[in-house]
Amino acid sequence: MIKKFIQKIWGQPQSRRGLVDFGKRVEIPASVHGINSNLVDERALNVVRTLQDAGYEAYVVGGAVRDLLLGLRPKDFDVATDATPEEVKSLFRRAFIIGRRFRIVHVVYGRGREHEVIEVSTFRAHLDNRAAEQVKGNEKTSKSELAGMTHAVDSSGRVLRDNVWGPQDEDATRRDFTVNAMYYDPESQYLVDYHGGMQDAKKKVLRMIGDPVARYREDPVRIIRAVRFAAKLSPLGFKLESKTAKPLATMLNLLADVPQSRLFDEMLKLLQTGHALASVAQLQSLGLHKGIYPLLDVVVERADTPFVKAALADTDRRVGEGKPVAPSFLLACVLWADVKVGWDQRVTQRVPPFPALQEAIDDVFDARIGDVSGRGKLAADMREIWMMQPRFEKRIGSTPFSLVEQPRFRAGFDFLRLRAEVGDVDLSLADWWQEFSMADDAAREDLIQQAKSEKDHLPASGTAKKRRAPRRRKPSTNNVSSASPSAEPGKLPSGE
Ligand code: ATP
Ligand code: MG
């Protein structure tokens, strides 16, 4: 009965499907695709089973299928189903409908840092621009009007609302790359492919489904996604198909209409999913080094400077090792050069160092960080990292004791260490703080004495040296933040 009702909603006259090529459903058995079903996340498996047991179709979909096929470990699992978001929600204890432009369900497992989200999306109908025309969103369409629409595009064809459910073949055609448009049923172990994704995966080709120009127009963020997947899969030998790559540089202007916060998020995905250096290389070789997003332009421009290069490489390494990374750390690295210029200028004008630094930071935020979601927290974290830097130079009195207890000490220290690695500060300063953060109180006093002696050009006292060894780890420093790149396991107590 419910199914019939849904079919009625879907009910698309043949004409609406028009001449679009929805591909042909091909079911590929495990003996051919070779995916190891044991690699499917348990929670994704549970979501698929629950939906199937309730009588719906359900598959693992998108990037997870692509990665499983390529022998990579998927970083997250998405599920696609013919159940509506409300129906999905009703089947799980902790499920939340999110998004307006694109309504999906988050099924949540576990709590706190260990929690896992499985994204469940309902099969989307083919975007019929004639149908969308009727509800065309334009500058005068208010947010509340738009919220009532299920399907809307703006005057350039950019999709504003996309909540019309449809059959699986239409859903497949709506996805971006052929290798991202396969469905895997972990129960039957069949791979469902409409657009030759499996063949393209074998040929190592990244091919946009349909006409790339129309697809970039529909959603210009696909331009950035093309760069991201080209970067991620380049070590495996993947290349963008020429028709997919060709329009990229000429269509960049379309990104001007995309909300800043979405561009910011996509920029972070380019930089923080383990392929930052490869992404910069792709941006350069595809002629996209300028014009995607102002802050990304700065990253590309500075990617060859020692400090930013080290920060990008370090981020890649951390992600590769499964460690957390924080956007505030990377962006603090990228914009450090601006902060330093503004700071120097003010100090030259006799502004005292701390207020000079504060003002320089304010300027950098105004000039470089746009109106992005979470800006407040991001800015606060970046500010703390920067403001800590001159405090690292003060190794006397109680300053080091209070600094080391700060919640963001770890991020500030990692920043200092990276600066030291590229010669921006003395390596011995970073080494001193490393020792200090790991030492017990007595050894810390000795280290402060040692720093004082150095400052006074006196040799460090022998007793101090003796008392420092053997050094004990101080458990109270465990509360330092580990959410920044460049930490070395074992060097500092970090809780990683
Ligand atoms: P990753 O491994 O980085 O998560 P992914 O391919 O899973 O890559 P997601 O952003 O998680 O990418 O999206 C999941 C799937 O949803 C994609 O594989 C693709 O099929 C589809 N998709 C996501 N964004 C778009 C888009 N802008 N246009 C078309 N399809 C999209
Ligand atoms: Mg994904």
Image (cartoon, rainbow, N blue to C red):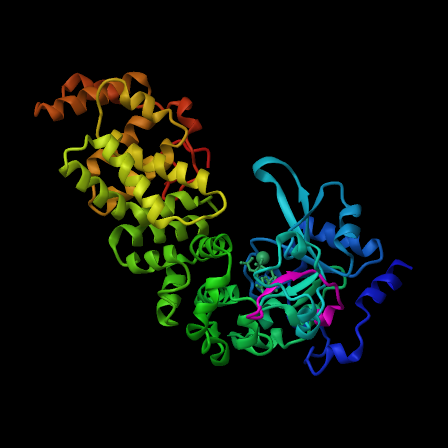
- Left or right of 375, for residue 435: left
Residue 164, horizontal then vertical, whole percent: 73, 63
Q: Is residue 43 above or below residue 227?
A: above
- Left or right of 192, for residue 113: left
What residue is at 54 percent from the left and 71 percent from the top?
Answer: 217
What residue is at 62 percent from the left and 59 percent from the top?
Answer: 141
Q: Is residue 18 above or below residue 216?
A: below
Residue 26, horizontal then vertical, whole percent: 72, 76
- Tell which quarter ligand 2 is in: bottom right
In this view, the residue farthest toward the right is 1
Residue 376 visible in the shown view: yes
Q: Is residue 360 magenta?
A: no
Asked which quadrant contains residue 198, the reply is bottom right
Q: Which residues are magenta?
A: 155-170
In this view, the residue farthest toward the bottom is 19
Q: Is residue 157 above or below residue 375?
A: below
What residue is at 40 percent from the left and 31 percent from the top?
Answer: 493
- Left or right of 114, for residue 79: right
In this view, the residue farthest toward the front is 140
- Left or right of 348, for residue 260: right
Residue 432 visible in the shown view: no
Q: Is residue 161 magenta?
A: yes
What residue is at 57 percent from the left and 67 percent from the top?
Answer: 158
In this view, the residue farthest toward the left is 457
Q: Quadrant of the N terminus?
A: bottom right
Residue 81, horizontal then vertical, whole percent: 74, 59
